[in-house]
Amino acid sequence: MTKITSQMVDRGGLIELDVGNDVSGSSRFNEDIAPTQASERTWTKWNIAALWVGMSICVPTYTLGGVLTAYFGLSVGKHYSQFCWPT
């Protein structure tokens, strides 16, 4: 018997989705990008920390920060009060 509706299930502190026909029958559902089951999750806090560090030191991040800084007319030396309250 197949499930008709999807539901969230707590599996020992991890939340997973029990996929039903309402989701799996959708034209937008794809097994490749569906949420993983709790038993399939293998990342630890060290994997997530490594990803975060790797993403934070890459060149596009600094480029984006520089572009946004220039776009909003800010400089490194400007103080918070100089651009929040007009004089």
Image (cartoon, helix red, strand yellow):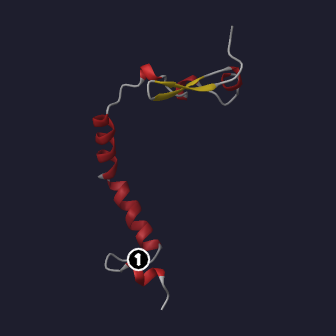
Residue 56 position, x and y percent, is 32, 51
> Where does residue 19 sit, x and y in percent of width and height?
61, 22
Q: Please, what secondary structure does the residue beneath circle 1 have? A: loop
Say which of 65 and 7 sits in front. 7
Q: Judge from the rendering whether residue 71 lies leftward or rightward of residue 42; answer left or right.
A: right
Q: Position of residue 23 (x, y in %)?
A: 67, 26
Residue at the spot x=33%, y=45% of the render?
Answer: 52
The answer to whether residue 41 is above or below residue 46 is above
Tag count in the figure? 1
The residue lying at 30 percent from left, 45 percent from top is 54
Task: Identify the image quadrant of the N terminus.
Answer: top right
85 left or right, relative to 42: right
Residue sticking out furthest to the bottom: 87
Identify which amino acid the numbered label 1 is placed on: Leu
* 29 on left or right of 53: right
Bin the neighbour count of mark 1 within 10 Å (Cα to Cα): few under 14, some 14-19, many 20 and up: some
Q: Quadrant of residue 33?
A: top right
Does 79 appear above or below 67? below
Which residue is depicted at the point 34% across and 38% down?
48
Mark 1 — residue?
74
Percent of width and height locating residue 16: 52, 26
Which residue appears farthest toward the top when viewing the image? Answer: 1
Residue at 70% of width from left, 28% of height from top?
Answer: 27
